[in-house]
Image (cartoon, grey):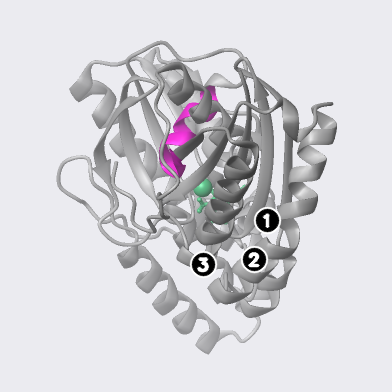
């Protein structure tokens, strides 16, 4: 079974080829255009997808050493994501599948982040918990099997990736700020500035309060010293990152106890964060968990994970019809 997968939910245009469950290529074209606007501009994102999609698909086929005539199915991200961006990938996938007269496979972007764990070894054993942390979502997912997952906790407002990006924006760092906070945090003192942690009931999260308190903190400190950010950048980043990680792991620990599960994974763009990766390893040793962390290339948006999810769907004969349309708020 040879599947071409397309990912275009946000600001990365990506294509991957999977042959019998093995990823043979995974090409990602990121969109630099958003940096100067301080965030993803949906209309610019969809236009950039239109420019990238043909060369990205061509390169994915070439790297996998196949031609389009070798394909048995076309997979695409149906949602959640930006409507205009999703439309580009969905329309391209539909047209190619129609032209080649092969089936289509629609994939849920967040489920694909979880299934990125099945690309490389070691693979988690079922059931496992996956903390899925990206620019748009923060979820604890209970995974019974590749196609049977349930969200058991999630953010009630901002996603943790958004908290990283908004913190960076307030510090005048370019978008996406998450990786820069990570970089500066490495040289800083995580205990220098204590930020408040909001208590949420159950397994849910909230990140909007910390964003507001960070804004007030910066306003207060820069009034006293106009060079406060410049002089303390590393400590500010380290302290904020440590707080966000503490919030994430506290609930993950609670979920693991509640569900009596020791197979623990993380996924999504924020799982590329070196602080989160290190703290999860540490906590895993204390709690006696088996911890699963994806390779960097499969943390942020990529079509490899879409291809992996499509492989599982194809195995079960789960294809979709040509009248499929994208779902910006696709349900689980
Ligand atoms: O999964 P992803 O690539 O796209 C979405 O589905 O949203 O996640 C993007 C998010 C952004 O908020 C970005 O700042 C964050 O992941 N991110 C990071 C790091 N790398 C990416 N956040 C913290 N530290 C990182 N190293
Ligand atoms: Zn994502």
- Which residue lies under the disc numbered 1? 184
Residue 40, placed above or below residue 250: below
Q: Are marks 2 and 3 in contact (CB under 8 Å)?
A: no
Residue 288 visible, this angle: yes
Residue 143, placed above or below residue 28: above
Instruction: Select label 2 or label 3 by which is in front.
Output: 3
Residue 23: image location, x then y, percent: 68, 24
Helix, strand or loop for disc 3:
helix
Is residue 115 covered in magenta? yes
Helix, strand or loop for disc 1:
helix
Q: Residue at x 74, y 64 (%)?
A: 51
Specify the segment rendered in magenta: 107-117
In the rendered image, the quadrant that contains the C terminus is top left
- Which residue lies under the disc numbered 3? 84
Crowd band around label 1 with a 10 angstrom C-alpha radius: few (<14), some (14–19), many (20+): some
- Quarter of the image where one finds residue 49: bottom right
Q: Residue at x 47, y 63 (%)?
A: 82
Q: Residue at x 80, y 51 (%)?
A: 55
> Which label was assigned to residue 233?
2
Name the main secondary structure of what is drawn in magenta.
Answer: helix
Residue 196: image location, x then y, percent: 33, 59
**Quick one: 82 or 172, which is closer to the camera?**
82
Q: Residue furthest left?
A: 201
Residue 290: image location, x then y, percent: 45, 14
Q: Is residue 320 left or right of residue 273?
A: left
Q: CA distance from mark 1 to mark 3?
A: 34 Å
- Quarter of the image where one finds residue 36: bottom right
Crowd band around label 3 with a 10 angstrom C-alpha radius: few (<14), some (14–19), many (20+): many
Q: CA distance from mark 1 to mark 2?
A: 7 Å
């Amino acid at each position: 079974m040879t599947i071409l997968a397309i990912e275009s939910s946000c600001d990365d245009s990506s294509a991957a080829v999977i042959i019998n469950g093995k990823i043979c290529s995974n090409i990602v074209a990121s969109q630099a255009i958003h940096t100067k606007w301080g965030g993803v501009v949906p209309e610019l994102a969809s236009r950039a997808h239109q420019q990238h999609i043909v060369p990205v698909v061509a390169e994915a086929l070439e790297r996998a050493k196949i031609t389009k005539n070798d394909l048995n199915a076309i997979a695409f991200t149906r949602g959640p994501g930006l409507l205009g961006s999703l439309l580009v990938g969905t329309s391209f996938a539909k047209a190619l599948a129609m032209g080649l007269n092969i089936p289509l496979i629609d994939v849920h972007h967040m489920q694909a982040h979880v299934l990125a764990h099945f690309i490389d070894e070691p693979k988690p054993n079922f059931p496992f918990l996956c903390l899925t942390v990206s620019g748009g979502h923060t979820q604890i997912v209970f995974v019974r099997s590749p196609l049977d997952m349930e969200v058991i906790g999630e953010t009630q407002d901002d996603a943790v990736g958004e908290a990283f990006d908004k913190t960076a924006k307030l510090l005048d760092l370019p978008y996406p700020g998450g990786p820069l906070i990570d970089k500066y945090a490495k040289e800083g003192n995580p205990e220098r500035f204590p930020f408040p942690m909001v208590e949420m009931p159950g397994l849910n999260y909230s990140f909007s309060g910390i964003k507001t308190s960070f804004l007030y903190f910066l306003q207060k400190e820069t009034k006293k010293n106009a060079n406060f950010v410049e002089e303390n950048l590393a400590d500010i980043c380290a302290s904020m990152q440590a707080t966000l990680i503490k919030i994430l792991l506290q609930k993950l620990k609670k979920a693991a106890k509640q569900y009596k599960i020791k197979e623990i994974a993380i996924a999504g763009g924020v799982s590329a964060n070196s602080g989160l990766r290190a703290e999860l390893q540490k906590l895993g040793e204390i709690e006696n968990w088996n911890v699963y962390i994806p390779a960097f290339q499969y943390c942020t948006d990529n079509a490899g994970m879409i291809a992996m999810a499509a492989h599982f769907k194809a195995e079960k004969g789960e294809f979709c019809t040509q009248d499929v349309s994208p779902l910006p708020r696709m349900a689980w």
